[in-house]
Image (tube, helix red, strand yellow):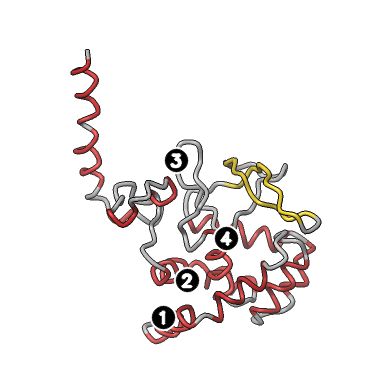
Amino acid sequence: PEDKMVMPNSKKVPMMDINKVLPDVDLNQPDKTSISVAMSDSSKQDELKPFTDKRSFIDTLMPYAKKVAKSLGISPAVLVAQSALETGWGKKIINGADNQSSFNLFNIKANKSWQGDKVAKDSLEVENGIGIKRRSDFRSYDNFAQSFADYEKFITNNQRYQGALQQGADAERYIEELQQAGYATDPQYADKIKKIMQSESFQSTLAEGAING
């Protein structure tokens, strides 16, 4: 009986190797076979991580950010920086119970009006200056494009964020107004995003992207 149990498990390796011939779908379905030695902490989040570094994070998401930013009339850089803070540069994108990525780049919660898929996750909320862990439902998408599109809808349809949108391309004022309107409970939320935008690595990557088209 023990031998019979070992055999099926041993077949998993070639099955994963077969998946490697499909590199073109890694944007929509993170390559689950890319568990490299560098990700030896065995984190489930890292197993689904499609980003190798901050540069790949920016380069991957900037096209989506530009499309949404143009529609909202804001800076695309602030959207990339906001998603970087929310997901730890892609390392902490929320996974579902089946270990599939939620592709939720902005950690938008699934309220009662949300009809799509959702995943439950413990999150730290700051209430009266005290950090409290609460379990919440978050929205789940099929890909990053859906995440950006829903962010656009979420910001546009919520009246309380109109003040933020009125800041236009002033990225710092936009994120400050977004925080004041209650997007996040972290009192340092806007400052953390501005720090990312002002960092030398972020600025240089954006500059290279502009030069290279």
Mark 3 nearby-residue class (10 Å; few <14, some 14–19, many ≥20): few
Q: Which residue is mark 1?
A: 209
> Which residue does the image show at 78% across and 72% down from the upper left?
163
Q: Nearer the viewer, residue 14 or 167?
A: 14
Query: In the shown orientation, is residue 132 left or right of residue 96?
Result: right
Which quadrant would residue 196 be assigned to in this image? bottom right
Please say if 190 is above or below 90: below
Residue type at numbered disc 1: Gly
Number of marks drawn: 4
Do tag 2 and tag 1 residues touch (Cβ < 8 Å)? yes
Residue type at numbered disc 2: Met
Q: Which residue is mark 3?
A: 99
Q: Which residue is mark 2?
A: 62
Query: In the shown orientation, is residue 142 left or right of residue 136?
Result: left
Q: Is residue 29 at all visible to an observer of this figure?
A: no
Q: Which residue is mark 4?
A: 86
Badge 3 element: loop
What's the CA distance linking mark 4 and mark 2?
Answer: 16 Å
Question: Which of disc 2 and disc 3 is earlier in sequence?
Answer: 2
What's the CA distance linking mark 1 and mark 3?
Answer: 32 Å
> Which residue does the image show at 19% across and 24% down from the upper left?
7
Seen as rendered, the residue at the extreme top is: 1
What's the CA distance linking mark 1 and mark 4?
Answer: 22 Å
Badge 1 element: helix
> Which residue does the image show at 50% across and 36% down from the upper left?
97
- Please state, as top left, top right, bottom left or bottom right, where the C terminus lies in the image: bottom left
Residue type at numbered disc 3: Asn
Q: At which x and y percent is residue 182?
A: 76, 61
